[in-house]
Amino acid sequence: MAKKSKIERNKQRVALVKRYAAKREALLSTANDESLPMEDRFEARLKLAELPRNANPTRIRNRCAMTGRPRAYYRKLGISRVALRDLGSRGMIPGLVKSSW
């Protein structure tokens, strides 16, 4: 089980990303639009830099929904390999059979 503080910090980051998504998108489109004057683009970059760092989507860490584990995360399932194996061993995932040889 991951530390609760890490899980909560990641939840706060997700909330910040949602809150600033529209503003960030507008500033990025302005900053990357080459038809605009360089001054406007530079000003948009400065405003983008003033946004909170945690408002950047790349700072969100994919974590297991069950345990909060940050590594070995399956995006399709939303859980880690450890949780997947545990659920599979209990027979809670249809079609998943633990192999042995």
Image: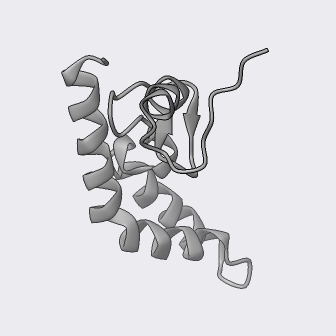
Of 9 and 27, which appears nearest the observer?
A: 9
Residue 54, placed above or below residue 31: above
> Picture coordinates of residue 15 (x, y %)?
25, 54
Query: Residue at point 21% right, 33% down?
Result: 8
The part of the image, by quadrant, that contains residue 69 is top left
> Picture coordinates of residue 4 (x, y %)?
20, 23
Q: Give the quadrant of the C terminus.
A: top right
Of 19 and 1, which appears nearest the observer?
A: 1
The part of the image, by quadrant, that contains residue 1 is top left
Q: Is 47 left, or right, of 10 in this rendering? A: right
> Picture coordinates of residue 94 (x, y %)?
52, 50
Q: Is 72 left, or right, of 33 in this rendering? A: left
Q: Is 31 left, or right, of 22 in this rendering? A: right
Residue 98, placed above or below residue 17: above
Of 44 and 83, which appears nearest the observer?
A: 83
Q: Is 20 left, or right, of 31 in this rendering? A: left
> Picture coordinates of residue 37 (x, y %)?
65, 79
